[in-house]
Amino acid sequence: EMQLVEFGGGVVQPGRSLRLSCAASGIVFDDYAMHWVRQAPGKGLEWVAGISWNSRGAGYADSVKGRFTVSRDNAKNSLFLQMNTLRPEDTALYFCAKDMSQHYDTGGYGFDLWGQGTMVIVSS
Amino acid sequence: VLTQSPATLALSPGQRASLSCRASQTVNTYLAWYQQKPGQAPRLLIYDASHRATGIPARFSGSGSGTDFTLTISSLEPDDFAVYYCQQRSKWSPDTFGQGTKLEIK
């Protein structure tokens, strides 16, 4: 069964850091780009970051650029999101999602497999 | 920027639904549609504006190019009432999602 499972969420104070992980199974992980998408409580979807299959390309939303870093370990079928200098507005459910393409910025296609998300709450 | 309309659409099972997504600048056909139900992750319905994803019923169809796109559900089933999002996947700008259209039972 194809599956993505996120973990690492929790409650953190503003200005602190948190690292999210996403474990993939049932897919050829290193064939595809991967992404993080978040959803604040009661709000819509926001793309956060994406990374190409070979880690040679990555991109970020303006709202997290310079604070968040996406990475992957293909040997461990894992995706990561290092979140630094967290703000209250980063509070959201964070989903990891698989791209249909190898490159995060190919143009076209879509995200055809999603995890159930891990919740991050930034509060003092 | 992607603008979806209407924000809420109230229809009955068996009716036809048309959901709109408009981009502030051309995205060619680099547009996807997702369905999200409460407490669940989004599900890919349509990619590249008009291609149905694997396992998606034929009653879902997508059309459009450039800046104007439509998701059509030909005959609504009870399971189709959910929130729908469009997503632009242009090569030249970061991915963005529309704000969503809530499809509710009338």
Image (cartoon, coloured by chain):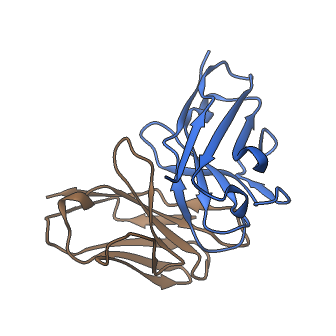
Q: Position of residue A54 (x, y in %)?
A: 81, 59
Q: Which quadrant of the structure image shows residue A122?
A: top right
Q: Which quadrant of the structure image shows residue A108?
A: bottom right
Examine the rendering and report whether any part of residue B13 can be seen: yes
Q: Is residue A54 left or right of residue A28?
A: right
The answer to which of A59 and A99 lies nearer the viewer is A99
Q: Is residue B12 left or right of residue A35?
A: left
Above/below status of B106 relative to A80: below
Examine the rendering and report whether any part of residue A71 can be seen: no
Which chain gets the blue colouring? A
Q: Position of residue B51 (x, y in %)?
A: 47, 80
Chain B, chosen colour in render: brown
Above/below status of B94 relative to A43: below
The quadrant in which the C terminus of chain A is found is top right
Above/below status of A58 relative to B18: above
**Residue, far top:** A124
Q: Residue at x 68, y 62 (%)?
A: A32
Q: Which quadrant of the structure image shows residue B26?
A: bottom right
Q: Position of residue B1 (x, y in %)?
A: 58, 64
Q: Is residue B41 left or right of residue A12?
A: left
**Residue, far right:** A56
Query: How many discs mark residues in the rendered view?
Result: 0
Q: Is residue A25 left or right of residue A59?
A: left
Q: Residue at x 66, y 72 (%)?
A: B90
The answer to which of A28 and B92 lies nearer the viewer is A28
Q: Residue at x 51, y 50 (%)?
A: A45
